[in-house]
Image (cartoon, rainbow, N blue to C red):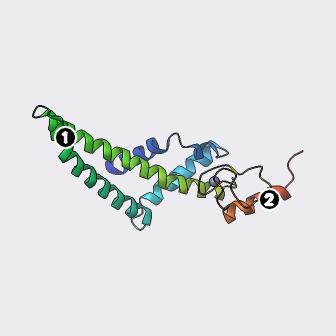
Amino acid sequence: MGRKWSRALFLRWSVRDMPELELFESEQQRRQAIQEIEIESNNPFNAGVWIALVIGIVTVAAVRWVAKRVVPLLDLPPGIDTAVHILIILVTIVVVLRALNRWGTARELRAKLLEVGVPVCMYCGYCLRGLAPGARGCPECGRTIDERAATLLEQSDVEPTGR
Ligand SMILES: [Zn+2]
C-alpha cells in the first residue's frame, strides 16, 4: 500500500509542471486523466513500464560504473567518498525516473487530451486549436498531425463557434 502511494506521489511530482496539463478544459478533466494514467501505470502488462524499467536499470548501472572510477580520483576522505558515490547513484535514479515518467506521461496525457476533444500534437504537445482543418503538419515540430487531432480540427470547423 505504501509503495503504491509513494509511486502516485512521485508521478504527481514528476508531471506537476507539464504544459500538457494546462490544456485540459477543466480541473476535473485534468484529475481524471492523471488518475487513469496512474491506474494504467500499475498494470504489469503495460509495455511502457517494462521499457522504462530496462532503461532505468541500464542507466543506473552505467552511472555506477562511471562513479566507481571517477569518485576515487577526487581524493576524498574515507567515508565521504562512499557518501558521494551513494549520492550520485540516488540522484541518478531520481532524475532518470522523473524523466521517464515525464516522457511516458506526456504521450499518455496527449492521448487523453485528444479523447476529451482538445486537438494536440502527439509528438510535441503543441495545441493545434485554431489551425485550419485539413492542415497536415504541426506548426511547432512539423510532424504529421495525428488522425484523431485532424478529425477534431474538422469537427471544430463544422460546429457553430458561438458567435
Ligand atoms: Zn508538434
Position of residue 2 relative to residue 151, above or below, is above
Q: Secondary structure at mark 2?
A: loop
Residue 15 place in picture, x, y as percent: 49, 44
> Which residue is found at the position 67% from the left and 45% from the top?
25
Image position of 104 (left or right of 72): right
Question: Which residue is the site of mark 1?
Answer: 71
Residue 146 shows in the view: yes
Instruction: Specify the quarter for ligand 1.
Output: bottom right
Q: Secondary structure at mark 1?
A: helix
Residue pictured at 43% horizontal, 48% vertical: 99
Name of the residue lying farthest toward the front: 73
In which quadrant of the rendered view does residue 46 lie? bottom left
Kind of residue indicated by mark 2:
Pro
Residue 59 coordinates in the image, percent (x, y): 32, 54
Q: Amino acid at mark 1?
A: Val
Question: Crowding at label 2, few (<14), some or many (≥20) Cα neighbours within 10 Å?
Answer: some
How far apart in space, not on screen, are marks 1 and 2 (Cα)? 57 Å
Give the class, few, some or many, for how many residues have Cα within 10 Å of label 1's Cα (few <14, many ≥20).
some
Q: What's the residue at 44%, 58% (across, down)?
A: 41
> Residue under circle 2?
133
Mark 1 vs mark 2: in front: 1
- Residue with the most extreme bottom position: 45
Question: Residue 156 shows which numbered tag?
Answer: none
Among all residues in the image, which is located at the extreme right? 163
What residue is at 59 percent from the left and 52 percent from the top? 124
x, y percentage for residue 161? 85, 49
Of pointers 1 and 2, the one earlier in the residue sequence: 1
